[in-house]
Image: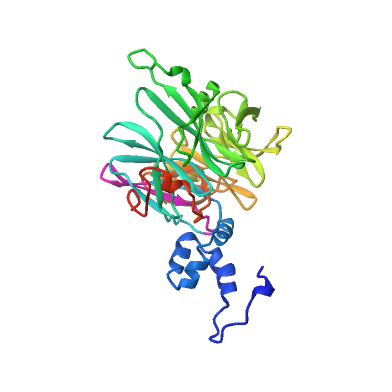
Amino acid sequence: MVDAARVTAPPPDGSLPDEITIWEILVRLPPKSLLRCRAVCRAWRSATSTRRFLLAHNALQPTLPLLYGYNFVGDEVESLDIIPFHQRAGAGELQLRPVARLAQDSDFHHLEACCDGLLVLSFRNTSVRDWRFAVCNPATRQYAPLPLAYGSGVEYSLLGMYPHTPTGDYRLLMFRDSVSMHHQLVPDAAQDGSYIFTLGSGQPPRHIGFLEAEVLTFTFGSLLFRGSLHWRPPGNMIMVFDTTTELFWQMRAPAVPPGHAKLFQMDEMLGMSGFNDAATTIDIWVAQDYESEVWACKYRVDFSVAEITLRFGKFDESSWVVVMPSDGDVFLLVNFGEWLLQLDIGGKLVATFHRRGLGPANLRLKQTLVQHTFFPILEGYVTNSPPFI
């Protein structure tokens, strides 16, 4: 609501007062549209560049399921599209528009984690043949490789990304593993385990131990919920990492086979999905009481629908299913080869998209134009330059 005490009389030319234009219209625009509007006049550019405005703008942006899309030239991957999924009622075919495109060249990027509009990507530099990490903001087109020490038989796996509320920092939870070389461990293998890396701190990752976290490297990624990272590893428990105390703990999991389980947030509840061994149905569970660890199966979706199997083939282990909350309900995004399908909770086909190299990332993006001080500190930092296209 506009503060009536701050609204001035309408300008004599009949245009809207700046208070309404800025705080009721511009603040609701998608980031790309807002950046274009900054070119209209200096007053708009100045007003929409303040931290107060950017925080208000970010608060009004939708949190959208994230897709990845690889673009090919022949059999070679040329670029990666970062695509928020906008659900459009009645659309028979999905209209997917990337918010950013990264050149692949020698660096082959994969989406790994997402937090407050920031993305962490892994990439393989083919010249040195190892995997590394980078952080980027697709809305501001900022990108920087992360200064993690590699080589000498040491590998890092990303377990999750989170804001550390007490300090305001953004941190990565990593797992370091010493790779055996000629059947011998590297000399500092005793330092394997979990690490915390603070973006822009200038400090190396901090060792916190907990070797048991190695099992988390084999899950479908983490979910940040109620200030904690969550994973579904093998066994009958969910692993949880409190991002304030930076300690691990466990909670009970529903009866979903861990090799098929994915976590998601539905409204204010923790959710988990998993398909049966025959890959014909998927169960969707919600934690009705998070503190008491009480779960209930809310939906069961049947994938043996004739319309789907006749057109796209049998659902199998190579297919990828992601449950996406939407207005108090859920829908499913399913990969069938080169097809991306949207299904409702009854298993009915709602929309389709045919594209090679397209799939759901099991991440959600809330775009932001808020500036972060850690970017310029990181060596190799660029803005609006390659790898952005």
- How would you classify the magenta stretch by its main secondary structure? strand
Q: The N terminus is located in which quarter?
A: bottom right
Q: Is residue 188 visible?
A: yes
The colouring scheme, among rainbow, by chain, secondary structure or one colour, is: rainbow
Side of 376 relative to 130 (left or right):
right
User: At which x and y percent is residue 302?
Assistant: 57, 39
Residue interval drawn in magenta: 70-90
User: At which x and y percent is residue 115?
Assistant: 53, 45
Q: Is residue 310 visible?
A: no
Residue at the far top: name it: 183
The answer to which of 123 and 280 lies nearer the viewer is 123
The answer to which of 217 and 24 lies nearer the viewer is 24
User: At which x and y percent is residue 69?
Assistant: 39, 47
In this view, 336 is above or below 142: above
Residue depicted at x 32% and y 40%: 107
The answer to which of 306 and 45 lies nearer the viewer is 45
In this view, 33 is above or below 207: below
Side of 73 relative to 133 (left or right):
left
Side of 365 relative to 345 (left or right):
left
Confirm whether the magenta stretch covers residue 88: yes
